[in-house]
Amino acid sequence: MELPPGFRPLVGTEDTTIDKMGRVLIPKSKRDRLGDNFAITLGTNGCLVILPQWHWEGLWSWVGQVPPNNFGREEYTRMVFGEAEDNLHFDAQGRLVVPQRLRELAGLRQRVKLVGAFDRIEVWDADEYERFLENREEYGRERRELLERAMRLIEEARP
């Protein structure tokens, strides 16, 4: 996926909270680099990932090059697009409302870590992030392996 002109990576880790309405304050530096329109989905390890619009559209393009009956495409789209919300925007206070379904899937409680990860922001429950850091290779292994397999099948079928 080609980076857009003027790309500035999403960097840094912040501690924040998520309220009962699912609102998370995103720091201005990350909001500015993310842009006004973005998507959120379940990430490779089970955290949430916030993707800038250009990244989200790049995924559409990549997956769209493969026939719809390709097993890898079916699995990938179910796991990534099926768990996504797009056309999202920040409210006037710079907050993102994380849909309840995604909060539950990622196990978000009150304390949250926002991790700038180059082309995405990872949203972790703070305790889960600590568990991830303790054993990165094992944490979320099943989901990661399923996504990797689907991606290999997509790549093999691309023209």
Image (spheres, rainbow, N blue to C red):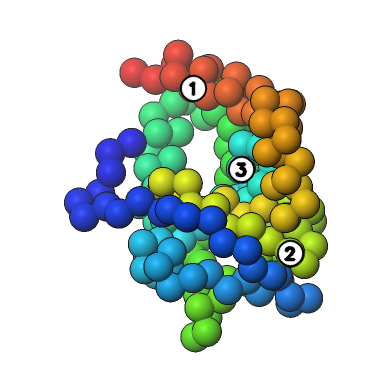
Q: In the displayed structure, would residue 36 be above or below residue 145?
A: below
Badge nearest the viewer, 3 or 2:
2
Contact, CB < 8 Å: mark 3 with mark 1? Answer: no
Q: How many angstroms separate mark 3 from mark 1 (CA)? A: 18 Å
Q: Where does label 3 land, which residue? A: 43
Is 77 placed above or below 73 here? below
The tag earlier along the polypeptide, 3 or 2, is: 3
State how far apart marks 3 and 2 are (Cα).
18 Å
Identify the mark at residue 154; answer none if there is no mark: 1
Q: Earlier in the sequence, mark 3 or mark 1?
A: 3
Image quadrant where residue 76 sits:
top right
User: What's the mark number on residue 49?
Assistant: none
| Residue 102 in picture, x, y percent from top left | 71, 56
Q: Locate residue 149, reporting x and y percent.
A: 60, 19
Task: Indicate which label's residue lies in the foreground, 1 or 2.
Answer: 2
Q: Residue at label 2?
A: 111
Q: Is residue 112 left or right of residue 122?
A: right
Q: Residues within 10 Å of mark 3 (few under 14, many from 20)?
A: many
The local secondary structure at tag 1 comes to helix
- For the question of whether residue 116 can be seen, the reply is yes
Q: Which residue is found at the position 40% from the left and 61% from the top?
A: 34
Q: Is residue 101 above or below residue 4?
A: below
Neighbor class of circle 2 (other Cα within 10 Å; few <14, some 14-19, many 20+) is some
**Can you say whether 38 is above or below 143 in the image?**
below
Q: Please state which amino acid type lies under the numbered disc 2.
A: Arg
Q: How far, Cα to Cα, is label 1 from label 2?
A: 36 Å
Look at 43% across and 40% down and name the residue there. Answer: 59
The image quadrant where one finds the N terminus is: top left
Which residue shows up at 41% across the image and 46% down it?
118
Q: Quadrant of residue 19?
A: bottom right
Dot 3: element: loop
